[in-house]
Amino acid sequence: MLAKIPIFSKLEFHIAARYLKTKKHDGVISIVSALSIVGIALGVATLIIVMSVMNGFRTELLSRILGVNSHISIYGNGHDIPGYDNIIKQLGINEDILSAIPMVEGHAIISNPRFGKVTEGIKVRGIKMEDFVANELLNNKNFQGDTAYFDIPSNPEGVIIGSRLAQALNAYPGDEVQIITPQTSSTVLGSVPRKKTFVIAGTFDVGMFEYDRHMIY
């Protein structure tokens, strides 16, 4: 068993006491020493508080970013990744990988049919519903709506959008939105952008403007 090592040795205490003590007939040095100690203590305390706040902010920021994104994203070379389920199973064997989920991602424009002038550029992500529900940052206490909406086959196709995007569109759970993608469809009149109407099944709020305003699932 290791013996406890004192933080300060006798020599350090002796040196500190030597310079803090003063003669009885002169109290100036003791006042200066006291003020010096208080000043150093306040400076160190301020530094510790600032570092604690910054570390806490960094931890919170990383948790929010990694709650929506991942450390590593794997994309196919211009095409879908075949056999991704087997790849995910193999990744799950590695104890250093906490989670791996399949995802489809793209960009589009969203609008509220009732207010056609309001449009927003968005990032669209398609994931499995169980993966969304398991994500504590997305499916938190601020989530509005019902994730069971997608379990009912008779329901129209739905989306889950960010809370700030919902405010910008003035559209909330139960309302319809129209999504237009850059991919085109060939018609007799030529190529036209693809567009489709969806029902808002819910809204999420992760506390970061970039995600809450420009992302849907």
Image: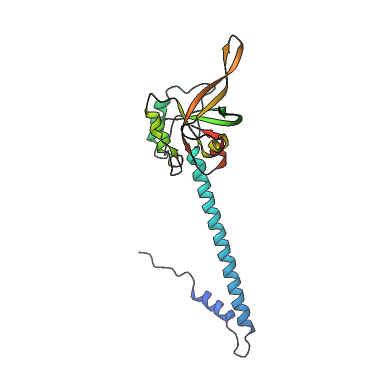
Quarter of the rendering occupied by the N terminus: bottom left
For residue 194, above or below residue 102: above
- Residue 68 appears in the figure: yes
**What residue is rendered at 49% in x and 26% in y?**
198
Residue 215 vs 81, above or below: the answer is below
Quick one: which residue is furthest to the top in this view? 188
Q: Nearer the viewer, residue 180 or 67?
A: 180
Position of residue 51 in the picture relative to residue 152 (left or right) = right
Q: Is residue 200 above or below residue 22?
A: above
Residue depicted at x 55% and y 31% = 123
Q: Where is residue 216 drawn, in percent x and y? A: 51, 32
Q: Position of residue 94 (x, y in %)?
A: 40, 36
Q: Residue furthest bottom?
A: 25
Question: Is residue 90 something that shows in the picture?
Answer: no
Image coordinates of residue 29 in percent, x first then y, are 63, 82
Question: Which of these two is toward me, 119 or 72?
Answer: 119
Q: Is residue 76 above or below residue 98?
A: above
Please name whichever residue, 135 or 145, is drawn nearer the observer in this view of the structure. 145
Q: Residue at x 52, y 39 (%)?
A: 163
